[in-house]
Amino acid sequence: FVPAGVQHESIALSNTIFVGIYLNPEFGATYEPQVRTIALTPFLNELLQEIRRQCEGETSHEEVLHLLAVLHDQILKSNVQTF
């Protein structure tokens, strides 16, 4: 997990697909300014895929914000390693 405003670089060492979801801090999601690893559980994986599908479709802004709130909660409660 890379919080907004943290300078970073991603380099793929193998055949990798990067998926990014920007959580704008202006909407109230605040995090410590450091990169953290978060385990990609089956639930979190499905949540990320659903957010992506909803953003590509004709879903209301309110529905997407609700999914982002769930993502925010998952990030806060996950076991993390900080770098």
Image (cartoon, rainbow, N blue to C red):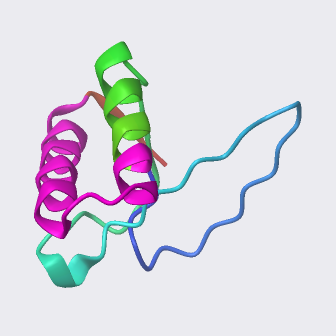
Residue 4 image offset from top left, x and y in percent:
40, 73
Residue 70 image offset from top left, x and y in percent:
14, 43
Residue 20 image offset from top left, x and y in percent:
53, 55
Query: From the viewer's perspective, is residue 73 above or below residue 6?
Result: above
Please say whether residue 68 is one of the residues in the magenta stretch.
yes
Please say whether residue 37 is one of the residues in the magenta stretch.
no
Residue beneath the point at 81% across and 51% down: 11
Residue 19 image offset from top left, x and y in percent:
58, 48
Q: Is residue 26 left or right of residue 17?
A: left
> Looking at the image, which residue sits at the far bottom?
26
| Secondary structure that dominates the magenta span | helix
Residue beneath the point at 34% across and 50% down: 54
Q: Which residues are drawn in magenta?
A: 52-78
Q: Is residue 23 left or right of residue 66?
A: right
> Looking at the image, which residue sits at the far top?
42
Answer with the quarter of the image where residue 43 lies: top left
Residue beneath the point at 83% across and 43% down: 12
**Total labels drawn:** 0
Query: From the viewer's perspective, is residue 20 above or below residue 29?
Result: above
Q: Nearer the viewer, residue 70 or 60?
A: 60
Q: Nearer the viewer, residue 44 or 55?
A: 55
Query: From the viewer's perspective, is residue 25 above or below residue 78?
Result: below
Q: Nearer the viewer, residue 13 or 27?
A: 27
Residue beneath the point at 42% across and 45% down: 53
Q: Is residue 14 left or right of residue 6?
A: right
Query: From the viewer's perspective, is residue 19 above or below residue 22?
Result: above
Answer with the quarter of the image where residue 34 lies: bottom left
Q: Nearer the viewer, residue 64 or 73?
A: 64
